[in-house]
Image: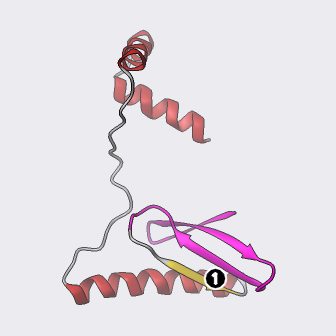
Amino acid sequence: MTMMRCKGYEALVEYDEEADLFHGEVINLRDVITFQGRSVDELKQALSDSIDDYLAFCVERGEEPEKPYSGQFVVRVEPVLHRAVVSAAKRAGISLNKWVARTLERATA
């Protein structure tokens, strides 16, 4: 899989060998935006067009388009793990939030 970015949105792209076609889906929001193309240029244009279509559709319906994720989420863990990560953050001399963010950054790099 390959990542593409356009207008603040991120998409995963796959190649379908049988159809000789690239297809992708925007992944950093809950709404569904898909696109396809036979070449890289066609795929880039299709992604941009699909995002524009999504934004126009939201305007037509009088709705705010969903934005890529806000950067906030809730994680529920067992109390023992909660205590352990708070202790790790204190040992590192940083806030729990910063410790979790750094740990997630390392895990996804």
**39 or 62, nearer to the observer:** 62
Above or below 22: residue 12:
above
Residue 28 location (% of width, % of height): 45, 61
Residue 18, image quadrant: bottom right
Q: Does 10 sit left or right of 65 as displayed?
A: right
Q: Residue at x 41, y 84 (%)?
A: 52
Quarter the N terminus occupies: bottom right
Residue 81 location (% of width, % of height): 42, 19
Q: Does 87 sit left or right of 64 as displayed?
A: right
Under mark 1, the amino acid is Leu
Q: Residue at x 44, y 34 (%)?
A: 101
Residue segment shown in magenta: 1-30
Residue 4 location (% of width, % of height): 59, 68
Q: Residue at x 32, y 87 (%)?
A: 56
Above or below 50: residue 89:
above
Q: Give the residue pinned by disc 1.
A: 43
